[in-house]
Amino acid sequence: MKRILKRLALSLLVLFGLIQLKPVHRENPPVSSDLVAPADVKAILRRACYDCHSNETNWPWYAYVAPVSWLVQHDVEEGRGELNFSIWGNYDAGRRLSKASSALEEIDEGRMPLAPYLALHADAKLSPEDVAALKKWVDGLE
Ligand code: HEC
C-alpha cells in the first residue's frame, strides 16, 4: 500500500512538472485607444475589470502555474473578446453604449467581476457608490 501511494505521489509530481511545459500565452498587446471616461469611472473599471477586459492585465503568480494558468489565460482571452477597454475608441458609439450597458447589467446581476477573481482580489468588490458612478457614466453616453 505504501509503495503504491509513493508511486502515485511520484507520478502526480511528474505529471505536474510535465504540464508546466505547455506554453501559455500571457500577452499584453499594445493599448490602441484606451477608454476615455471620468477619473472615478476609470479608476473603478481599472480596479475591477481591467485584468480581464483590457490589454493591461496584471498576470498574478498563479497565472504561471499550470493548470491554473490555463484557466486564467482562458478568462483573459474570452474577457478581452467580449469587452476590451484598451480598444474602446475603436468601437463605434452604438457599440460603446451597448457594451457599457451590458457591463452595468453584469455588475447589477452579480456576474461580474467573476466570483473566483473577487475571492482573490478583495479590492475589486464594487460598493454601491461605485455602481452609482458607473450608472451616471452610462446614462451620459450617447
Ligand atoms: C477574472 C476575469 C474577469 C474580470 C475581473 C471581469 N470579467 Fe467580465 N468577463 C470575463 C469573461 C471570461 C467573460 C466571458 C464569459 C462570460 O460572459 O462569463 C466576461 C464577459 C463580460 C461581459 C459580456 C457579457 C455578455 O455575455 O454579454 C461584460 C459586459 C463584462 N464581462 C463586464 C465586466 C465588468 C464591467 C467587469 C468589472 C466590474 C468585469 N467584467 C470583470 C472575465 C472577467
Image (cartoon, rainbow, N blue to C red):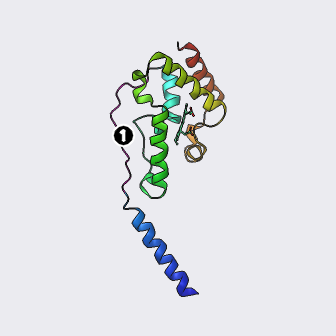
Q: How many marks?
A: 1
Q: Quadrant of residue 31?
A: top left
Quadrant where the N terminus is found in the figure? bottom right
State whether label 1 is within 8 Å of ligand 1.
no
Dominant secondary structure of the residues highlighted in magenta in the image: loop
- Tell me: 33 left or right of 48: left
| Residue at image location 62% in from the left, 26% down from the top | 131
Q: Name the quadrant where ligand 1 sits.
A: top right
What is the crowding at mark 1: few (fewer than 14 residues within 10 Å), some, or many (at least 20)? few
Residue placed under numbered mark 1 in the picture? 28
Residue drawn at x 58%, y 23% as measured from the top left: 101
Q: Is residue 32 magenta?
A: yes
List x then y, in percent, for residue 118: 58, 43
Please say if 120 is above or below 132: below
Seen at 40% across and 29% down, the residue is 86
Q: Is residue 123 left or right of residue 69?
A: right
Image position, residue 64 (x, y; %): 41, 54
Residue type indicated by callout 1: Asn
Q: 30 or 38: which is nearer to us?
A: 30
Q: Which residues are magenta?
A: 23-36
